[in-house]
Image: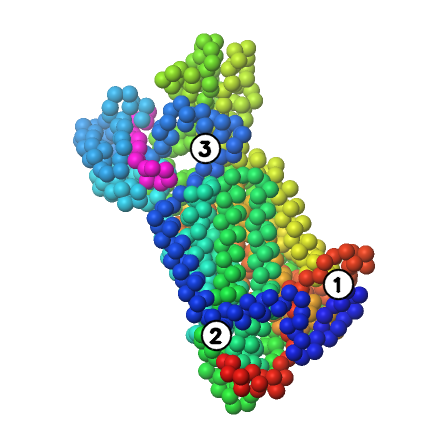
Amino acid sequence: MLTLPSGRHARVAPGEIDAIPGKHAMTALARWCLRRRFAVIVLWLVALAGTTAAATIGGPAYSNDYSVPGTESSRATALLQKAFPGEDGDDKIVWHTDRGTVRAPAVEQRMRDVLHQIAALPGVAAVESPYAGGGADRISPDRHTAYATVAFTSKGGDPDRAQVARVVDTARGAATGNLHIALGGSGIAVTEGSDSHLSEAIGVAVAAVVLFLVFGSLAASLLPIGTALVGVGTAAMATQLLGHLTKVADFAPMLGTLIGLGVGIDYALFIVTRHRKGLRQGLPVALAAERAVATTGRAVVFAGGTVCVALLGMLVLRLSFLTGVAVAASLTVVLTVAASVTLLPALLGLIGHRALSRRERRSLAAGGPRPETPTSLAARWSAFVERHPKTLGALAAAVMLVLALPTFSLHLGTSDQGNNPSQSTTRQAYDMLARGFGPGVNGPLTLVAPLDSAAESLAFNKLPDTLRHTPGVAAVSPSVLDRSGDTGVITVVPTSAPQSDATSALVQRLRTDVLPRATAGSGLEVRVGGLTAAYDDFAGVILHKLPLFVGVVVGLGCVLLLLAFRSIGIPLKAAAMNIAAVSSSFGLIVAVFQWGWGSDLLGLGGAGPIEPFLPVVMVSVLFGLSMDYQVFLVSRMYEEWLATGDNRRAVRVGLAETSRVINSAAVIMISVFLAFLLSGDRVIAMFGIGLATAVALDAFVLRTLLVPALMHLLGGANWWLPAWLERLLPRISIEPPEAAVPQQAQEQLVDAGRP
């Protein structure tokens, strides 16, 4: 059934399906890939091997610089790096004694020896001991805790993991029953966390089990896995190369892998499901694959396009490191879609009828094709929703609302090594420093100022005396000038932890009250930097631009759905459902990571604020993924609506025929996302839990309950479109209906030697 420009419906006769506009290109692509299946497979393997070789030679070049140009903290950092190059390391060796002090001869000698050994290790540039001259400030007032600073040699990026591990092992090997030693800092952190490949392997293994249960065929269950791995592997290597061209955040590769595996396996699942349906209808292998790509493959391309649109919405924020994340994640989605519509049909042609289980092949050979009906459970559920739309819709809405409530207490801020698991050495070092020197020592503020005159230098040198009497300040260092005397720096240790609201309040008070009053009339301009200041500035920029960003993402998604389904109601409901999924997933993130509900039990560390960039990335990804299920569900309803004009039947049939594959796809995606909890990275764990929660709610509450309930209640209004807008909009088709192939045509194809 097609919709003509006049709005009337027209039947598609058997054999005329390839005449549908835009479908011919997908059919031709699938046919080409099937006929040259070995060449297609080799080309993809060459692309994977080539990008892997290039990425290996070039090495990683990721960035963990989340500063925002133009903010006060970024200007402070730029001044500091220019005036004091190479002095921005934060790695420390911390030791604590229960009995006696760190000045006890035995303890001091033991630590002098171990620090001397560490200084001689490969990859260590310098070690500054508290026992050397000028190191008294690195011994706590109660003399039970001390720390030494360590500088690693590295040519950009993180230091060598193996060299850092030797430092950690050497230092911790000197511990005794009374002497506790831990190490902290960004360099030390590279030795912590599980291998990301473990989480990937577990997610893929679970997906393989689900696919085998769905298909009953080992060959068919391996195809989505293989297709996704090739696409994601190529994208991961391309992302590493992208880091040499633009700033790409250090979490971008794992985020891209997480998204790519989820959508890649799901997209291939949808196509293989349609291909298997064609085989059970008695179609030859090549024709079944062509039709699967020409119909479901088009929906996959559309769905992948919506994900990319949502991801590229981050570009409106004009934040360099988020731009890299958006491009890298979009590249991953593009390559997984490309693999699904090119590599997958080639593999389908290669395995032939083994895409069906043995039982299905025997049944087809014995009794021929039989009409397919939805599973009894899916049909019964669809009919149940049709009978009780108000009650079930209200129940689903209540569930989403309750889960979304914690989102209202979302706090964006500094998540640091104090949130790491309690057994990690970085967390132990963080806690030792906090107990010995006060919580503010883990996140000191840095005051930096350009000094262009003697009056400015004099005013700057007087600042420490003023700052020592400022509420919220625990300690202040003397002013330090660079060699040329053009830049001065003062270190301020707050009385509160870096992620505390009190520290953020101190930053604001210094900027707006204390420093302006202390420097009035001198012309001195002091900039406040440091960890808390940087994150507060970043959060402020994000919150300021968030409404524009969400509006762009939601608006573009609605336009795409408007073009696809010729309806005002469908896009508006999709936007509302996507916002509900995002809000509810953030509610769980807040409960687990910010409130700490079960975080230690899951090995995710202690409670703390949510990273400022997380809402932006999560909104992009979740809007894209939520749109996928909307497309696959509503496209089948739309097809039935065009054929019958009966809204109740359209909703009932669409839900019954798509719920099983959508639920299977959701289980796979949830398994992949949850497996990334094992990555050992707090940010990736947030993404994993958030995405898994959103997909679960989207598939099992929204798409199979709330959306069909609302569509039953709205009736024909679901498909209403003003006549004037109908005339203006261009026509696109996501998944054209396929016509049955007559038996005579099948016999001719088989006689012609097609597989």
Q: Main secondary structure of the magenta part?
A: loop
Amino acid on which the number 1 mark rests in the picture: Trp
Q: In what element is the residue under mark 2?
A: helix
Expressed as whole percent of the image width and height from the top left, the position of residue 372 reads 60, 80
Tell whether position 745 is magenta.
no
User: Which residue bears the numbered disc 3?
Assistant: 531
For this orientation, the residue located farthest to the bottom is 366
The residue at the point 45 percent across, 9 percent down is 454
* Front one among 36 and 385: 36
The reply to whether residue 326 is in sight is yes
Q: How crowded is mark 2: few (under 14 residues within 10 Å), some or many (20 or more)?
A: many
Q: Which of marks 1 and 3 is nearer the N terminus?
A: 3
Amino acid on which the number 3 mark rests in the picture: Leu
Q: Earlier in the sequence, mark 2 or mark 3?
A: 2
The residue at the point 52 percent across, 90 percent down is 366
The residue at the point 38 percent across, 24 percent down is 84
User: Could you say which disc has been placed on residue 146 in the image?
Assistant: none
User: Which residue bears the numbered disc 1?
Assistant: 719
Q: Are marks 1 and 2 in contact (CB under 8 Å)?
A: no
Q: Earlier in the sequence, mark 1 or mark 2?
A: 2
Q: In what element is the residue under mark 3?
A: helix
User: Which residue bears the numbered disc 2?
Assistant: 349
* Front one among 520 and 473: 520
Looking at the rendering, the stretch of residues picked out in magenta corresponds to: 139-159
Amino acid on which the number 2 mark rests in the picture: Gly
Q: Is 5 situated left or right of 491 in this image?
A: right
Q: In which quarter of the image is residue 644?
A: bottom right
Q: Nearer the viewer, mark 1 or mark 3?
A: 1
Tell whether position 148 is magenta.
yes
